[in-house]
Image (cartoon, rainbow, N blue to C red):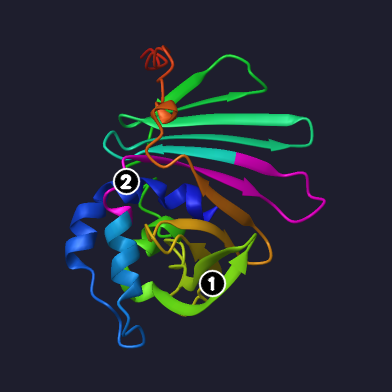
Amino acid sequence: MAALAAASALAAGPEAARAATAPANDPSGLGARIVGALAKVQSFRLEMSGPTGSGVAGTMTVEVPTKRMRLIMAGGTVVSESISADGKVYTRMNGGAWSVHDLAPDASSDPGMVQSMLDATHIRALPDRTEDGKVLGVYQITLAPPVGTTPQSIQAAMTCTYDKATYLPRTCANGFISEAFTGWNDPANTIVVPAVSSPPPPRSH
């Protein structure tokens, strides 16, 4: 899932914001404004749902300063939970015991939605729309292809809405997955790392 793979890239927000420039096809500078708004975020939640009838849904919580992520995904009778923190990833299934292992050095470097949102050149302004009586800004974002794919890989696109006062995104969808951003800077987003010991190294013979 693109958003999960790239969410920790938001921790690089201030640097990305300073480097952001409006692309030639965005004379309004919308991309740079969105990047700048995201660079000030401390934490957020992302509510995700799969195709209609799939039964797949999840919530991702991101703490920007600590670079911590928590993901809960449900599909059928299985609920999986993972926490990425301090170079380790903790996982458990259906509320069972936690297991822990070291996070691969490149595990959070896979380009995807959130990382793309920190690059103004990936954002193209679209006409506003009205939802529930509120006028929302709209843009299309081109997602960077995952690490390991060829340069010729087709880049995915999502259509997103944003708050015209804060420039923070509200929803994104592409016909397959729908995502809603909530809980900006909510203290309830605090991620508690499980108290689990790493497995001992194998004994030599």
Residue depicted at 79% across the width and 36% down the height: 76
Q: Which residue is mark 2?
A: 41
**Based on the displayed image, in which of its 4 quarters is residue 120 positioned?**
bottom left
SS at mark 1? strand
- Residue 44 lies in magenta, yes or no? yes
Q: Secondary structure at mark 2?
A: loop
Judge from the rendering whether residue 158 lies leftward or rightward of residue 63; answer left or right: right
Q: Which mark is residue 56?
A: none
Q: Is residue 38 above or below residue 197?
A: below
Q: Is residue 26 magenta?
A: no
Tell me which numbered mark, 1 or 2, is placed earlier along the sequence.
2
User: Looking at the image, is 141 positioned above or below residue 54?
Assistant: below
**Total number of numbered labels?**
2
Q: Which residues are magenta?
A: 38-58
Tag shown at residue 157: 1
Find residue 84 and report its horizontal and vertical position in percent.
41, 33
The amino acid pointed to by label 2 is: Val
Amino acid type assigned to the residue bearing label 1 in the image = Ala
Q: CA distance from mark 1 to mark 2?
A: 23 Å
Q: Position of residue 157 (x, y in %)?
A: 53, 72
- Which percent across, then down, holds residue 14? 20, 53
Query: Is 126 drawn above or below residue 191 in the view shown?
Result: below
